[in-house]
Amino acid sequence: MNVDLLPVLPAILVALAGILVLLAGAFANAGLAACRNLATAGLGAALLYVFLAPPDGSMGGTILGGAYSAFVQISILVVAILAAWLAAARLEDDKVRPHEFFTLMLFSTVGMLGLATAGEAISLFVALEIMSVALYALCAMPRTGPERQEAAIKYFITGAFSSAFLLFGIALLYGASGSTTLSAMAVSASSGGFLALMGAAFFFVGFLFKVGAAPFHMWSPDVYQGAATPVTAFMAAAVKIAAFGALGRVVAIAIGGLGGSWAPGIALVAGFTMVIGNLGALAQTDLKRLLAFSSVAHAGYMLSGVVGMAVSSTVAQARSLEALLFYVATYAITNLGAFGILIAIRRSGKEPSLTTDVTGLAKRNPVLAAMLTVLLISLTGVPISVGFVGKFHLFKAAVGAGYAGLAAVGVLMSAVSAFYYLRLVVLMYMEEPMEGVEFETDPGASPKIVALAAALTFGLGIAPAPLMALAKAAAASLF
């Protein structure tokens, strides 16, 4: 068996960085800056390796290199680096031991990198659990109030359910094919047997839990609200990339042949998710719960790209996967910036928590208000924003697969989302700030991270072609 360790080297580098941060904190009493810099160095080394010399081998067929893996891994590592610096701006306030926090973040990233490269079902499951277990612990930090523990327990319980569904799906697919490799599963899937169909159904249910799609989304608002904002930002951005990156590979290689059977169900889930996410967000007054329901809605948009892969033409499948990769990568940056705003500003010394807490922000801090406006416009999908470009290609893929109704629901729900996104813009620009309320800007790196996210969101809306070309090459490598 040909074993090539190069595809797993980025995960090894990040894991070594995690061990180093843990040891530095435990035995050398390393402070916040040292732990942050060590974590950044490990993530940066992995990013440089994947970017400059992307591996193209295979570790015994279980871990795969190539353009697809490189695109997903680079997206994850960029988000992880930005999230690490956002977290550092808040850890001192939250009285978190930095070596514990960054170690968990790094090992969660290891799991995400494994999801990006998994070419075999057991490897995929192990990577998913590495990511999830670290996130369960992160949700409980800092241990200063019951809301953190509540978030961690809810995430753990629903995560256990999703893992059970996923593992049962893998078992059924193994029973149908006699192998756990994705390429071998494709043979049994093409025959359309009952075991393969049920396996695909349970597999989808497991992933729908992880991405927060309705009706498996109820954990999302509570966990996003209860967890510390840096943890929520990391989860909202990086987990979406890793989960949809893995799901895209599985559909493209293993279960795409069953598309005629699972596509109607996934299209129904996608439309339901858009409706539940957007209507749920309309009723929210808490900023993090609003962004959580927004995340649910965007999971529905992304599932439109998965539905678009349920066609016989490999060219059309590649285009649908290209749209999915582009949207996931750009959404992660935009959403990370939106959560970063909550870290970058203080309202009378406290983190803004309610939608009314941004009232009058444009008059007190016009720069941050402008950056948040750019991010919200993109999340809405207003033309000449990167969100519009991504949604256009996702809905085009759904129409190409014969699901014009799903695209229509997506367009309608995008219009509904304008109400709760642009309501924040109205509060910032058209309302007077309350007397005695002061907005303070974090003196650390968080405003710069938000500025970078806003600049990338704006720039990719004007010139999406370079990133789209990379997504196209990544998607084409699987077909």
Image: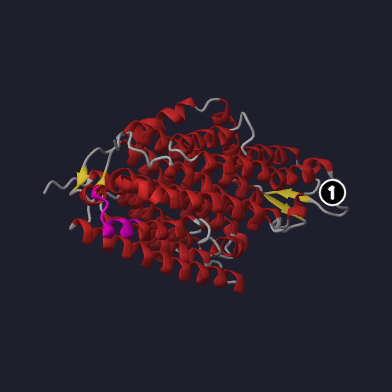
Left of 309 or right of it: where is 352?
right
Q: Quadrant of residue 373?
A: top right
Which residue lies at the image location 64% right of the left edge and 40% below the top edge? 380
Which residue lies at the image location 62% right of the left edge and 62% below the top edge? 225
Residue, far right: 435
Which residue lies at the image location 64% right of the left edge and 34% below the top edge? 382
Which residue lies at the image location 47% right of the left edge and 50% below the top edge? 240
* Residue marked by disc 1: 433
Quadrant that contains the C terminus: top left
User: How would you classify the magenta stretch by its main secondary structure?
Assistant: helix
- The magenta stretch spans residue 193: yes
User: Looking at the picture, how far across and down is residue 195, in whole percent?
Assistant: 27, 60
Local crowd at mark 1 within 10 Å, few (<14), some, or many (≥20)?
many
User: Looking at the picture, how far across and down is residue 18, in whole percent?
Assistant: 38, 57
Q: Quadrant of residue 96?
A: bottom right
Examine the rendered structure and indicate whether residue 396 appears above or below residue 28.
Answer: above
Q: How many marks?
A: 1
Span colored in magenta? 191-200
